[in-house]
Image (tube, rainbow, N blue to C red):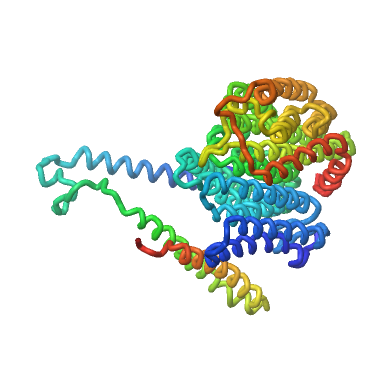
Amino acid sequence: MLEKYLPVLLVLAVAMIFAAVFLGLSFWLGPRRPNAQKNSTYECGIPVRGSTHIRFFVRFFLVAIFFLLFDLEAVFLYPWVLLFQPMLAAGQGIFALAEMGVFVLVLVVGFVYVWRKGGLEWQ
Amino acid sequence: MPELGGAALWPYLIVGGGGLLVMVVDSFVRTLKKDHLSYLTMFVLIAAIAVQIAGETREGTVLHGMLVTGAYARFFNFLFAGIGVVTTIFAGGIFDRDGRHRPEVYPLLLFTVLGMMVLAAANDLMTLFLGLETMSLATYVLAGGVRGDVRSSEAGFKYLVLGGFSSAFLLMGMALLYGFAGDTGFAGISAAMTQGEPDTILVTLGMGLMLVGFGFKVALVPFHMWTPDVYDGAPAYITGFMATAVKAAGFAILLRWVVLMQPQLAFVWYPVLAVLAVLTMSVGNVVAIVQSNIKRMLAWSSIAHAGYLFLGLLALMSPARGGSDAMMRTREMGEAAGSGLLFYLIAYSVMNLAAFGVVNVLSSERGKEADDINRYAGLSRRRPVAAAVLAVALLSLAGIPPFVGFMAKFYVFAAVVRAGLVPLAIIGVINSLVSVYYYLRVIVVMYMNEPAEDSYDGTEWVSFVTAGALALLVIYLGVRPDAFHHAAEVVVRQLPF
């Protein structure tokens, strides 16, 4: 039973050895001549402006959540589109359409709720 | 089992659609007064109960075997919808005190109930997970949804993080089981269990991981650390809901899962489960003794009650350990344990809701809850009815006759003894004796102490009447448990032992 997973284990081991060998080689062989430019945050040379720990306006959080919701809806539409033709051929077109209808309806209700509650207003 | 038509889905559609309807009404009708949403919510839940009574009663599967409807699902649908109605009443009870409108409670409550109904009827690992997450996600928000209250936010955050963690365990266990059986349907898994050589690492690990996930939801002892904080931080009516409905939903799926996994579970994990049950009872009761906050005390007591309920599950499994020599006895004993467990769930829900219903409305301070046990002093003189209701609920939780808590414990412990687990039954009874101490302490404070300046006082009579009705039910079911116990027996008989 478990020997089926031997290849997975092998790949894992090879990956680890590979990573260790090459990291070790570059650590051992690579020359180290540090200077101020090299030690800066961005090696491309762009100067750092201020701290990374700045405060974001909390509204971004809501927008991100809403984006996630509607983004996921779009993701769910793709497999449905792929399955719709076979289901239509099998005589289950109405069922498939109704399924997506229910899904979109739930989302639309959520959208209307967000809209009416003022979640989309910036201020 | 036959595949049924869509008619069996009506209760689910009504609760889910009702949740959406409440959201739409809430967002469009600005002139509504606060209580109207709770009326609408109650109407939805009662409609679901009515459709459940009038509708499909046959045993069968719906949606291509994803859900199984029948006596078992109906039993839990009634329980969840009933608890939902009571919680809605209690939720309406504190709006005057807090002066704050929380309309989002009602759709979330309906979605939680929908998740539990799906969970209890799940016939596939996918629907199991879907129901569990629908229930859990809505509960996280309900627990942490009191804006501006730090303890509520803490409760919601803790519940979310730890709950997500436990869901990951559950999902990993389900993946391993799927890897073993090649099927996510319960029927397929059951078939693979009985024919293959099921004693493999995959099944053992998968079952163990799933147990962690379920153990978290019903607050078994090594996975219980979230319970006191979450039960304490959430508003009391939500705590009552979590302690009854969410726990019942956890046991609804655990019972079916145990019956499904019995052949394996009864051997591999049985000793571990027995230890967990004993630990759960003992830790819950011992820690409850030192609590001075009544919500924390009830939280630890709910952990202890999960332990008693788990004893029932052990009794259910133990005949399967005996081999095939007494198949008939096996079935009979399994049914006794299962029906005892279901009856315990009803009893526990009724008495716990009565207790939380009183605790919920006793404080008259805005945004504060009546959680300090010492401030219950003299409640019997100020509010005799509320004190009597709370006393009945607590005595019943302690398992003192003639209240329903006694009958529930009697059925479960009797099944445990019949299954030959006498030591476990003795530990259970000792624990039950220990619990009398902390339940009685509240009653002593209420009845023996003089009311002080800062003693609690509440005036919300609708909640008192509801809690009073529940207390009467506690007494009635304690004296005449036959009808409900018989119903539980009928339900359990439908399970495939």
Horizontal relation, residue A17 to residue B201: left or right = left
Give me the residue at 53% from left, 38% from top: B365
Q: Is A80 drawn above or below residue B348 in the view shown?
A: below
Whether residue A2 is visible, yes or no, is yes
Whether residue B262 is visible, yes or no, is no
Q: Nearer the viewer, residue B22 or B465?
A: B465
Q: Is A65 drawn above or below residue B378 in the view shown?
A: below
Give me the residue at 30% from left, 52% from top: A56
- Residue B24 in percent (x, y) is at 56, 65
Please tell me in which quadrant of the rendered image residue B403 appears: top right
- Residue B37 in percent (x, y) is at 61, 58
Please tell me in which quadrant of the rendered image residue B424 appears: top right
Please tell me in which quadrant of the rendered image residue A87 appears: bottom right
Horizontal relation, residue B53 to residue B450: left or right = right
- Residue B62 in percent (x, y) is at 73, 62
Give me the residue at 87% from left, 34% from top: B325
Instruction: Quarter of the image for the N terminus of chain A: give it.
Output: top right
- Residue A99 in percent (x, y) is at 62, 70
Q: Nearer the viewer, residue B383 or B244?
A: B383
Instruction: Quarter of the image for the C terminus of chain A: give it.
Output: bottom left
Q: How many marks?
A: 0
Q: Nearer the viewer, residue B216 or B355?
A: B355
